Image (cartoon, grey):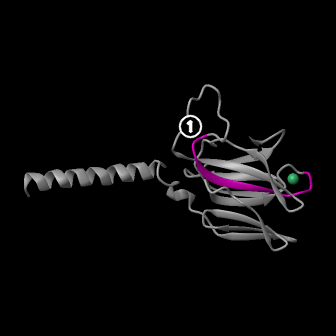
Amino acid sequence: MTKKTRIITGIAVSLVIALCVATYCGYIVPPLYSAPTDKIVSDGDLVIEQSGRKLTVENEGSPVWALPENVLAQDFLYEDIDRDGKAELLVLCWKRGRYGKHRPTWVESDEIKWSQHIFIYNIADGQVIPKWMASDIGMHARSWEAYKGVITITDTSGDVTKWGWIHWGLEKL
Ligand SMILES: [Ca+2]
């Protein structure tokens, strides 16, 4: 192997390693444990459908809402989280940065890394309206499920936590 070939090989190997590290750390795509599951949930005229990272809502056969393109779905739940008798749309999702449109005043700029969030939407009269959007949830949620207004989240280490709507927003139970 010539000196030039060794240099080129070294650069190529370094680039591959950097790419793998960036991917593993969530800079390029959300991590593998967040692989989405396709599913459809219907409630009367309402149809909520997840296809890969996309999530859409139809009402009476017409599209009424889609998860913003800069947000990638992992999973969703249709659950009466605040126990008012109507189900909300809860989305476990990924977006770049830890915050939404508004970040704390002491944070000069948001991160470019993908982070995991929970967004909750009200659905009323065929309209999907943002209700509560969590900043980075600070855990590695692999899966979640809901039962009687309680969300159970299992993280990548197998730890299980339960969450509920107590005052405003999800709180750990
Ligand atoms: Ca509700």
Q: Quadrant of the C terminus?
A: top right
Residue 31, percent from left and from top: 51, 54
The residue shown at (71%, 52%) is 152
Name the residue located 64 percent from the left edge and 53 percent from the top edge. 93
Foreground residue among 7 and 40: 7
Q: Nearer the viewer, residue 112 or 26?
A: 112
Residue drawn at (57%, 57%) of the image: 34
Q: Residue furthest bottom?
A: 61
Q: Residue furthest right?
A: 85
Q: Main secondary structure of the magenta part?
A: strand
**Residue 40 point in image, percent of width and height:** 73, 71
Q: Circle 1 sits on which residue?
A: 110
Within 10 Å of disc 1 (Cα), the crowding (few <14, some 14-19, many 20+) is some
Q: Is residue 21 left or right of residue 130?
A: left
**Whether residue 144 is situated above or below residue 115 in the rendered picture:** below
Q: In the image, residue 106 lies at what x, y percent?
A: 61, 25
Report the quarter where the N terminus lies. Answer: bottom left
Tag 1's secondary structure?
loop
Magenta span includes 92: yes
Q: Nearer the viewer, residue 156 or 77?
A: 77
Q: How many marks?
A: 1
For image coordinates 20% across by 51% down, the residue present is: 10
Is 59 in the magenta?
A: no
Q: Is residue 29 left or right of residue 10?
A: right
Does ligand 1 reach within 8 Å of label 1's beta carbon? no
Q: Residue furthest top?
A: 106
Residue 160 shows in the view: no
Boundaries of the magenta span: 84-98
Q: Is residue 60 left or right of residue 22?
A: right
Q: Position of residue 32 (x, y in %)?
A: 50, 58
As shown in the figure, which amino acid type bears the numbered disc 1? Asp
Do we see residue 128 in this rendering?
Answer: yes
